[in-house]
């Protein structure tokens, strides 16, 4: 027992001695030659001092103040980037049709570019809402309207009308959205706000007035609230095909494309009873009267949309076709929301992301609103039919270009 006690005492003494030596070494004592300071510079050793060397300041880990750009992520229009935080559309204090921040709500332009906006709260990305700056049709304004800066999905893309080569600011977009923007508040989320701009792969911290930050074409703006992320996401976009320079004229009673389906409804189509809430009536008032267009391509071949879909001897549905041009007539007494799925149900044909009127394959859908074109990634049945909206189905072989039109009944 006594022997074990002595051994235990010697072990404690040895441990204390080792700890003391380690502490001395950590304080810079006991060594000759050059010592290196925490900032990497060298200084001569205090070999002539008889007292203990003064401890060098402890090195403090440096937190990076500039996040790095992550590897680019490939994204398609229609994707949702981030966690849902806000409701879609502008708020009641934003753009509802009136002029906002010197921007007018009007029909979409015919030449568009885009910037991208990411918003992070304590490292978490928040999704930018869809349909900011888009105003639904009314009886007085049957075509509806959009502001020159707006969104169509939750991908973070801000679409910018550059028909007149105009430039837009982040402040204008937030004014259209109807949300606050400052160094301490982004759309109602408060905290210290830092802004970063990525143009061509170069990330720059923006220190000016946030409202004055110019939206860079094909560039990315990132607003960070609170704790910054270690990396800031950057994206590559698969843009739609360009528009063809050849204009297709849509003439009343005309034909566009090759015959493929029989005219009128199929055996499972509408027979006069309401379909998905769409009614059929004789002599229906046409107080609300707009037109959309559908083009279907199979391996590059344009297939003519059938005429007389929704037209019966005893009544016409609120949505119908008069010819083989692909124009969908919307004629009704009241403002209503109509979708492409309703048209196909009246027709009696399937419509999904894998089947368009019985044609299956790799299906891609493009929506074109007077030049504001993008790929649509949702259920095609849910596409809303608005004035002069063109919907193009690409089945199989990719299209080298998208068609442009001369409408026979512009509104």
Image: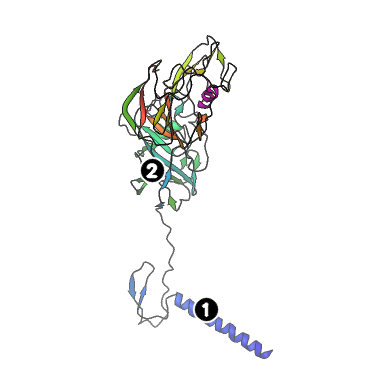
Q: Is residue 95 visible?
A: no
- Residue that lies at the very extreme toward the right in this rendered image: 1
Q: Is residue 171 above or below residue 279?
A: below
Left or right of 381, for residue 115: left
**Going from the N terminus, do you reach mark 2 or mark 1 first?**
1
Give the magenta-colored segment's residue range.
335-347
Query: Distance of mark 2 from mark 1, alpha carbons?
Result: 53 Å
Q: Is residue 169 above or below residue 259?
A: below
Please tell me the numbered disc located at residue 130.
Answer: none
Which residue is label 2 attached to? 220
Q: Splitting the image into 4 quarters, where does residue 390 fall?
A: top left
Between residue 185 and residue 94, name the one nearer to us. Answer: 94
Q: Main secondary structure of the magenta part?
A: helix
Residue at (50, 41) in percent of width and height? 189
Q: Secondary structure at mark 1?
A: helix
Mark 1 is surrounded, within 10 Å at the Cα level, by few (under 14), some (14 to 19) or many (20 or more) other residues, namely few
Q: Splitting the image into 4 quarters, where does residue 242 fall?
A: top left
Q: Splitting the image into 4 quarters, where does residue 245 fall?
A: top left
| Image location (x, y in percent) of residue 321 | 47, 18
Q: Is residue 42 visible?
A: yes
Please tell me the numbered disc located at residue 19.
Answer: 1
């Amino acid at each position: 027992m006594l022997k074990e006690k002595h051994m235990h005492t010697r072990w404690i003494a040895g441990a204390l001695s080792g700890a003391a030596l380690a502490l001395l070494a950590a304080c810079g004592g006991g060594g000759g030659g050059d010592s290196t300071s925490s900032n990497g510079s060298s200084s001569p050793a205090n070999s002539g001092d008889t007292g203990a060397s003064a401890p060098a300041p402890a090195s403090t880990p440096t937190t990076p103040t500039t996040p790095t750009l992550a590897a680019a992520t490939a994204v398609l229009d229609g994707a949702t980037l981030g966690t849902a935080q806000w409701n879609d559309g502008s708020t009641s204090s934003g753009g509802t049709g009136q002029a906002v921040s010197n921007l007018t709500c009007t029909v979409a332009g015919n030449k568009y570019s885009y910037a991208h906006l990411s918003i992070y709260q304590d490292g978490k990305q928040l999704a930018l809402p869809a349909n900011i700056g888009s105003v639904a049709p009314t009886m007085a304004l049957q075509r509806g309207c959009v502001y020159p800066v707006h969104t169509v999905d939750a991908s973070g893309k801000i679409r910018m009308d550059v028909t007149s080569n105009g430039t837009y600011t982040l402040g204008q977009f937030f004014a259209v959205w109807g949300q606050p923007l400052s160094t301490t508040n982004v759309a109602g989320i408060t905290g210290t706000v830092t802004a970063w701009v990525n143009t061509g792969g170069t990330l720059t911290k923006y220190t000016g007035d946030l409202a004055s930050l110019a939206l860079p074409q094909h560039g990315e703006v990132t607003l960070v609230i609170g704790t910054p992320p270690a990396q800031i996401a950057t994206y590559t976009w698969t843009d739609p095909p360009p528009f063809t320079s050849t204009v297709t004229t849509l003439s009343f009673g005309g034909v566009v494309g090759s015959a493929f389906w029989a005219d009128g409804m199929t055996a499972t189509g509408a027979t006069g009873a309401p379909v998905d809430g769409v009614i059929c009536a004789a002599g229906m008032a046409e107080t609300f009267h707009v037109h959309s267009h559908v083009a279907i391509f199979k391996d590059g071949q344009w297939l003519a949309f059938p005429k007389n879909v929704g037209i019966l001897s005893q009544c016409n549905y609120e949505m119908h076709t008069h010819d083989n041009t692909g124009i969908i007539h919307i004629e009704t007494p009241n403002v209503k929301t109509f979708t492409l799925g309703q048209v196909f149900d009246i027709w009696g044909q399937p419509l999904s992301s894998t089947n368009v009127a019985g044609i299956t394959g790799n299906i891609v859908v493009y929506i074109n609103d007077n030049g504001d074109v993008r790929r649509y990634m949702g259920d095609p049945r849910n596409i809303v039919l608005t004035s002069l909206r063109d919907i193009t189905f690409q089945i199989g072989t990719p299209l080298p270009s998208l068609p442009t039109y001369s409408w026979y009944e512009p509104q």
